[in-house]
Image: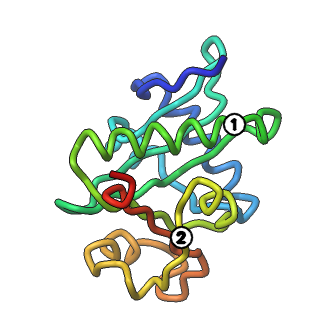
Amino acid sequence: MATVEKATIKDATQIHQLVNYFADKGEMLARPLSEIYENIRDYFVIRQSQRVLACGALHVSWVDLAEIKSLAVTEDWQSQGLGDLLVAACLKEARELGIPTIFCLTYKPTFFERCGFTKVAKTELPHKVWGECYRCPKFPDCDEVALIFHLEEED
């Protein structure tokens, strides 16, 4: 049974390798290792022994908004529910923090729709989320799909 845990500093290089493996294939955005270290407390991982099989982060953007980002599962462990477990962990943490709205920008919208997210126009996202986008090489021509999840709708 896979267990979701908070990432530790020892996981940073494996998270970096996993995320950038899929970024090199054009399936997600690359993350510099320094950014992963700076935000290690945002990350969850699923490990087998010392190997990181999957990772994902919940990054708080504002008082009422957080982003799920850098969600990746090694190819040999895909389609086994690890991504679902990571999204559930992120949503649980958002609920515990009192953050009602979670969004993601992704090239895999179907996965997030299965997790209960709904597509929105990027223009519907608050301007606060675009602070990181200025550093992206694809800005202003972002080709990711925006999706959103409202926790208050569950209660």
Residue positioned most to the front: 155
Mark 1 residue type: Gly
> In front here: 82 or 20?
82
Mark 1: secondary structure? loop
The image shows residue 94, relative to residue 122, as above or below, that is above
Q: Is residue 84 left or right of residue 31?
A: right
Q: Is residue 106 above or below residue 89?
A: below
Q: Give the residue pinned by disc 2.
A: 118
Q: Establish if 99 lies above or below 5.
A: below
Report crowding for label 2: few under 14, some 14 to 19, many 20 or more residues within 10 A (C-alpha): some
| The N terminus: image quadrant | top right
What distance separates the C-alpha of mark 1 from that of mark 2? 20 Å
Image spot of residue 25 (x, y percent): 76, 60
Q: Could you tell whether 116 is left or right of 100 in the image?
A: right
Residue drawn 42% across and 38% down?
43
Q: Residue furthest left?
A: 63
Name the residue beneath numbered marker 1: 81
Q: Of the residues shown, which amino acid type is indicated by label 2?
A: Thr
Q: Position of residue 91 (x, y in %)?
A: 41, 46
Q: Residue 96 at x, y = what percent? A: 26, 39
